[in-house]
Amino acid sequence: MPAPDDCFLLVVAGLPGSGKTTIAWRLADRLDVPVVEMDHHYLPAPTGGTSVDFSDPRSLDVDAILQTIERHRLTGAKTIIIEGIFALSLEVIHRRASLTVWVEAPPDVALARKLLRKLQEGTDVQPSIHGYLEHARTNYLRHVLPAAQTADVHLDGTQPLETLVGSLLEKLPR
């Protein structure tokens, strides 16, 4: 089901650290529209001491994401930005999109940005490094990168933020 006629859904995806969240929020600030961050919609960690696998789309609470989108639509949003690693990988999100965007960044740059962000937050980076080496890289190759080919727009996440936002503004309805 495509986006309802009364709401433009901009879906932004990319690797962790590619710049997708920064772009989405800057664009949202410019347009005064809501952002649905898929990172805020993971299922609770299973019991038994295991943690959430943030590199697996099955860890997302898709129903909660869809409810958040619908809540924004019902409150009058004419444009909603949905951003996340798996935003293009999840068919239920992708098929509702009015415009899809892939933010590209070299894997080493994206990983360095992610780790620097964790350090700035005061978070231990070791779990991220171990997770990447143990399963995240494989999951990204399986779930995320193939979806990149389906994007309507490809952005170079190493370009200046205002350049990227400007190029997206040109593609949005007025």
Image: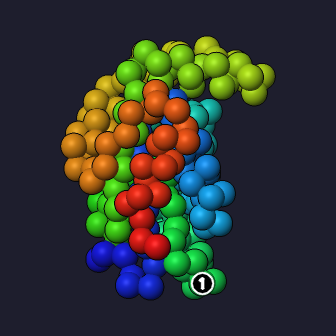
The residue positioned 75% from the left and 27% from the top of the image is: 121
Q: Residue 3 occupies which quadrant of the picture? A: bottom left
In the shown orientation, is residue 36 left or right of residue 15? Answer: right
Label 1 sits on what residue type?
Gly
The residue positioned 63% from the left and 83% from the top of the image is: 75
- Image coords of residue 108 (percent x, y): 43, 15
For residue 3, above or below residue 107: below
- Image coords of residue 137 (percent x, y): 37, 24
Disc 1 crowd rating (10 Å Cα; few below 14, some 14-19, many 20+) is few
- Image coords of residue 15 (percent x, y): 42, 34
In the shown orientation, is residue 5 left or right of residue 18? Answer: left
122 and 112: which is toward the camera? 112
Quadrant in the picture for the N terminus:
bottom left
Q: Secondary structure at mark 1?
A: loop
The residue positioned 42% from the left and 49% from the top of the image is: 167
- Image coords of residue 11 (percent x, y): 42, 57
Q: Is residue 156 visible?
A: yes
Find disc 1 in the rendering and name its residue. Answer: 76
